[in-house]
Amino acid sequence: VSTQSTGADARKWREERNVRTFFTYSFSTGEVLNLITQPEKHIGSHVWPACLNFCKYWEENRDLLKGKTVLELGSGVGLLGLVISKLGAKRVILTDREETLDILSRNVNTYNDEGRCSVLPLTWGNIKHMENLPKNIDLVVGAEIVYKLLDVFASHSVKYISHTALDQKTKRNFLEKQKSILLLNR
């Protein structure tokens, strides 16, 4: 008797058993981060291409992070925020929706040696979540978070957003609303 399993069967099996996979990020210095991922569970439990490009950007521009308090939107598994922390940011607040916080918190707890990172829930449009954010943020960053027109954090002076694909109408509307944005298209 022969049985065949499909990729969907394997995903279902891993999801039912709460199996986690790992993603390894290597810094140019050779240091590595091994992060828990669970792509079958939630869109934010996956490392997306723009995040990798953004991490490399910050490795090349680490001087922009020195002494800064950074808010990361849509942190997912925490790769970008942890890289930014390791590169010298004074403080990094990693945020995401409630369903992603378990994996995010585990990864942050594993690599938060110097206590510079914290995790907070943030669902866009949730006033209570937004009121709990610190007020002294120097940089707002996010990778693969612009899927529709967003009008959040307009009062912050510097924002860095990285994406791999965004329809032109959404991109144009977003840029019109946000006057101080650097969009990294890599």
Image (cartoon, grey):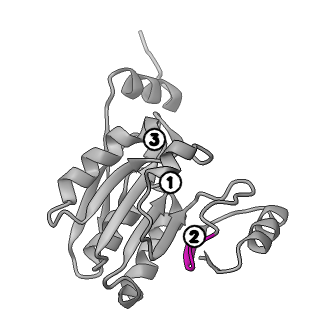
Quadrant (top left/top right/bottom left/bottom right) for the N terminus: top left
Q: Looking at the image, is mark 1 or mark 2 earlier in the sequence?
A: 1
What percent of the width, then of the height, locates residue 177?
Answer: 76, 69
Say whether disc 1 or disc 3 marks the residue closer to the N-terminus: 3
- Element carrying mark 2: strand
* Quadrant position of residue 146: bottom right
169 shown above or below 46 = below
Look at mark 1 in the image and give the residue it sits on.
74
Q: Residue furthest top?
A: 1
Percent of width and height locating residue 26: 29, 70
Magenta segment main secondary structure? loop
The region drawn magenta spans 155-160
Q: Name the residue that disc number 3 marks.
A: 39
- Farthest residue toward the left? 113
Q: Residue 145, located in which quarter of the rendered image? A: bottom right
Amino acid type at circle 3 is Pro
Q: Which mark lies nearer to you, 1 or 2?
A: 1
User: Circle 2 is placed at which residue position?
Assistant: 162
- Please report contact status of discs 3 and 2: CB closer than 8 Å, yes or no: no
Does 127 appear above or below 61? Answer: above
Q: How crowded is mark 3: few (under 14 residues within 10 Å), some or many (20 or more)?
A: some
